[in-house]
Structures are given as structure tokens and as C-alpha cells.
Image: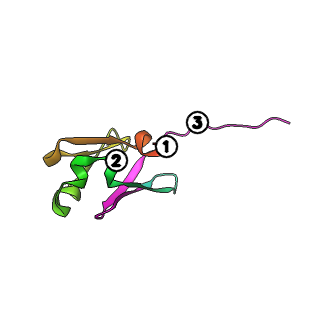
């Protein structure tokens, strides 16, 4: 018996931030949440700045222009 594996590139489709975490909805239906503590610039930012994001690379990452912060979806999926 063999096990098939599929190489899926995770892509973000939506992002939201609250005072504790970043939540990211992925194109494959998964939703992930990571603590803001992982990203000090986001942790120290205002709610308005945290919610002023754009997707980059077709959803491979998230960019916050006013904070000069980029976060890749792959980094969100890695264990710290």
C-alpha cells in the first residue's frame, strides 16, 4: 500500500487581526491563527494599521505598507 502526497501551496484569501492574534483564511479552506507576539511590529501597531493589509504574491504573503511588515503564509504554518 502506498500513501499519495499532494504538494499544495498554501494561499491566503483573507486576513483579520485582533489584539491577540492574526487569523488567516486559506484558499484550501483552512483557517490559521497565530499570536501577535510573533510579530512585534503588528503587536505594537494600532488596530487601524493592523487591518490595512494587502495580499502579495497571489496570496503567498501578507504586506502591511504602513508598518513595513511582510509575513509569508508558510511562516505562519511553521511551528515556533
Which mark, residue 7?
3
What is the distance, in whole Å, between disc 3 and disc 1 at their CAs?
A: 19 Å
Relative to residue 24, is residue 72 depicted above or below? above
Q: Residue furthest left?
A: 66
**Closer to us: 19 or 27:** 19
Question: Which residue is depicted at the point 32% across and 61% down?
Answer: 16
Rounded to the nearest whole Å, what is the CA distance between mark 2 and mark 1? 11 Å
Residue matched to label 1: 79
Q: Which residues are magenta?
A: 1-24
**Element at label 2:** helix
Q: Residues within 10 Å of mark 1 (few under 14, many from 20)?
A: few
Asked if the residue at tag 3 contacts the one at tag 2, i.e. Cβ–Cβ closer than 8 Å, the answer is: no
**Precedes in sequence: disc 3 or disc 1:** 3
Is 16 magenta? The answer is yes
Image location (x, y in percent) of residue 15: 34, 57
Whole-number angstrom distance, CA of label 2 to CA of label 3:
26 Å
Residue 67: % across, % down: 16, 46
> Is 12 displayed left or right of 2 in the figure?
left
Q: Secondary structure at mark 1?
A: loop
> Is 18 located above or below residue 30 in the figure?
below
Q: Disc count in the image?
A: 3
* Depth order, front residue of 30/47: 47
Q: Quadrant of residue 63?
A: top left
Q: Earlier in the sequence, mark 2 or mark 1?
A: 2
Q: Where, quadrant-wise, is the N terminus in this rendering?
A: top right
Q: Which is in the foreground here, disc 3 or disc 1?
A: 1
- Say few, some or many: other residues with alpha carbon within 10 Å of mark 3 (under 14 / 14 to 19 / 20 or more): few
Q: Quadrant of residue 47?
A: bottom left
User: Badge 2 is on which residue?
Assistant: 38
Amino acid at each position: 500500500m502506498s500513501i499519495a502526497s499532494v504538494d499544495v501551496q498554501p494561499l491566503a484569501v483573507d486576513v483579520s487581526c485582533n489584539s491577540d492574534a492574526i487569523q488567516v483564511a486559506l484558499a484550501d479552506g483552512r483557517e490559521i491563527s497565530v499570536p501577535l507576539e510573533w510579530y512585534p511590529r503588528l503587536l505594537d501597531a494600532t488596530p487601524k494599521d493592523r487591518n490595512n493589509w494587502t495580499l502579495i504574491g497571489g496570496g503567498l504573503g501578507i504586506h502591511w505598507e504602513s508598518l513595513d511588515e511582510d509575513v509569508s503564509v508558510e511562516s505562519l504554518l511553521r511551528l515556533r
